[in-house]
Image (cartoon, rainbow, N blue to C red):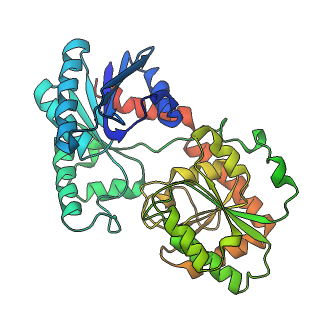
Amino acid sequence: MNICFIGKHIYPKDIFSNEQDMKTWRSLAEYFNRLFVIAQSPDIFFHSVGEKNIKIYLIPNIFGYLGFIGIAVKVGVYLRWKYGIDCFDASEVAGGGLAATFLKFLTGAKSVIEVQGEIFGENYENKGYKKTLLKKIGIFVMKKADRIRVNSEAVFHQVSRQYIEEKKIRLIHLRVDLDLFNPLSILRINSEKNDDKIKIGYVGRLAEGKGLEDLLAAISQLCQGHGKRANFKVLIFGDGQLKSKLIKMSENLRIHDKIEWRGFVSYNKVPEALSQIDVFVYPSWHEGFGRSIMEALAMEKAVVATNVGGIPDLIKNGENGFLVNPHNPKELAEKILELINNQDLRAKFGKNGRQYVSGNFEWNHGIKKFANLFLELK
């Protein structure tokens, strides 16, 4: 069986440097004869690279949204003609979703559409006509698709409420490599070993909707209230368009001395970053699933996260972490302080967290379930 993934994501020319996605494609490729990927180039040139039974095509990033769809369809028709593609999979509904739908009509191949994030959720960040248009496109491509894949219970129910047959929907959770994210294989770097401060941390994009403003507000409350004598600091790993705004906010709140901005970390370095954290905080306002939370749990970290989207698939409140309401810095501060002051509870949440993800999100089991989604269409 030959499959082709289509997504309007921009990848570097050296696409093999994208460790996270390459790991998924390499694992999936073991189940198929050939695996193809169509995505966007970082420049105005067309790039193609391959290894073993994987071939990746990067479309020039100069033709806009409609241009991407048009070229992706042309490449898809070519691949169907030359290699007999059995199924086109779209990793998002707008660009890849329309391309896969047109390819199904033109070639007769099957189509699978992924709905990620919460485009049908109440808290989705796109408002007004953009949200309305995206929802209409999503419903159109889902109705035409042979299968729809979602990554959380929340998104599953959001999709089913759009009058989509549940027998077409497959819950395919994200996966975690328990060998890579293994607390026993990571030692704290020397500069951290003699630091007795509790480390509150975040790993992820510094982007709108991640609730990082609430995290800073919570830290400010800790510095002023019952937590002002607590011995802690905040480590923020990641980069994004919100960084300068957040730094300015931390200065205005007079908590800049509590925060260390550690910058971007590559996928293989995320376990090392997490090893330096005692309390992992993820205050997102909307979330399809929460990969960073899953990885923190695998590293036996106590987690405080918001009760939105697919996060409850990962956090069982009071068992392996705390769930708090979004946009609520006061509640966030209270739960962080509780974990700062209770080492035994941090240890309990950490052990329970790794046990939970080991039983539900292990890499090889998840990849097999992912591959079976396509094999059942054969």
Q: Position of residue 37 (x, y in %)?
A: 34, 28
> Which residue is at the front of the view, 321 or 261?
261
Furthest-left residue in view?
Answer: 106
Question: What residue appears at the point 84 percent right and 60 percent down from the top-left corner?
Answer: 195
Any part of residue 368 in sight: yes
Furthest-bottom residue in view?
Answer: 225
> Which residue is at the front of the view, 174 or 180?
180
Q: Position of residue 325 (x, y in %)?
A: 50, 75
Any part of residue 324 in sight: no
Question: What residue appears at the point 80 percent right and 81 percent down from the top-left corner?
Answer: 229
**Which quadrant would residue 266 be assigned to in this image?**
top right
Residue 277 lies, with reference to residue 142, above or below; the image says below
Q: Position of residue 362 (x, y in %)?
A: 57, 39
Is 306 placed left or right of 226 in the picture? Answer: left
Residue 242 lies, with reference to residue 168, above or below; the image says below
Q: Quadrant of the C terminus?
A: top left
Is 32 placed left or right of 245 in the picture? Answer: left
Furthest-right residue in view?
Answer: 194
Question: What residue appears at the point 70 percent right and 70 percent down from the top-left corner?
Answer: 258
